[in-house]
Amino acid sequence: EQALIAGDFEGAVSALERMLLVDPKLPKIRLELGKLYIRLGSYAVARIFLEEVIMSGEASNKDQEEAKLLLDETKNAQNIIQFNNSFVWGLRVQSNANSAPKDSRIIIFGIPATLDDDFTSKGDYDAYFTMVSNVNIEDSVWENVNYTGSLVLYGNEHLDQTSLNAKLGSASAGFNIEDDIFSIPFTFSPYIDATYLRLSADELFYNYGGGSNLQININETISVLGKLERTLIRFNDLSKTGSETALNGDAIEIGFDIFYQASPFDILSCSLLFIDEDTKNRKDSSKINQISISYDKDLAGFDVEFLKDISVKIDFGASERDYQATDFLTDASQKRTDFKITSGMSVKYKFLENLHFSMLFQMVENRSNINNFDYKNNSATLQTEFTF
């Protein structure tokens, strides 16, 4: 009430949301939050709170009726076109930026050799920038349909290993259909996308394709996302007059994500990914099987003042990449199999509602049946994210 008198709507929202952290089953508080977000112009967020009041078995009839009236108002007032954007700046240090093998003794064309010092493990610093822009367009006729688009831009700059600098651009467009199957909510999202990646002064990679996602919310705590995508892959060796290489091909990607919200402060997710890539020369065709697990913990759940704006995330991943043909660098009958293990932890601090600072630590170990491709790399990153 004091915040409202002072015109501090954000302060009022913060006070009410802290009450929900203590007791999530307060429909009256959710109704008041819906009203506040309407006054702030955040209609999409307001609708979430108002719909929760309508569906709540603990809300009074009066509160439910008021929520329904307000929900109709938000639908009329909500912008047909909405944008959300994020900018990320980061500074990273890596122990083995060039992913050089652990041992300088390697095999080339079946002959033992020793790596030159320039190609052994090199630590380095790099700075990077990422911009993500998303647009959502509500259909004026079908309430359960909206159209989406996204643009991602990325670039980095190394201090020493400048051959590793990358410039990436990716765009996608599609639409979402939201409905119910046997009272189970789902979202079906077909899309098309394209990616451009320049790895160095003379290496260019791009792909284009499409796919679809299907997300099913089993209950309030568990949701499952399935993904199927087909991509055409193209490489251009710019040092050779832009000719396309034998690495060109296509890939089919199948993925599954499972999200479990154990509490308002704990989210556990597991992802499975299967990629079958077929190249023009067949020699570099490969299959990738990948699993990753992450745990997000919002420390506000401890109800300690200095922890209320801090969250922690722990990640673990493992992937196996199997080259379908022989590797001519070693035994003519031997296939190459890489097994990568990744683990990491990040700590995020919410300085402002739309400004976050993060520290990230990651360890990567790649093991292979060919010592040329064994490597380890540890990295530490400082990151700033601004959203609007």
Image (tube, rainbow, N blue to C red):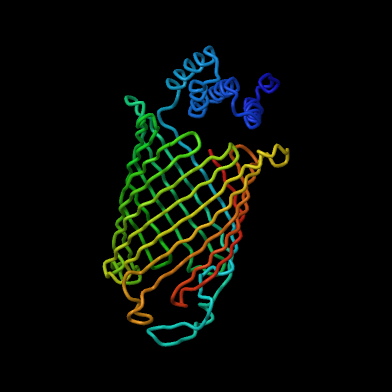
Q: In the figure, 45 relative to 111: above or below?
A: above
Picture coordinates of residue 152, whole percent (x, y): 44, 49
Q: Quadrant of residue 178?
A: top left
Give the image quarter of residue 143: top left
Q: Position of residue 150 (x, y in %)?
A: 41, 43
In this view, the residue farthest toward the top is 62
Number of numbered callouts drawn: 0
Quadrant holding the N terminus: top right
Q: Where's residue 5, x and y in %? A: 68, 19
Q: Residue furthest right?
A: 305
Residue at position x 51%, y 16% in the image: 64
Q: Looking at the picture, tell me which residue is in the foreground, 56 or 235.
A: 56
Asked whether 182 or 104 is in front, the reply is 182
Q: Quadrant of residue 332?
A: bottom left
Q: Position of residue 214 (x, y in %)?
A: 36, 41
As drawn, 5 above or below 182:
above
Answer with left or right where residue 98 lies relative to residue 145.
right
At 53% across and 56% down in the image, what residue appears?
316
Which residue is rendered at x = 63% and y = 50% of the image? 347
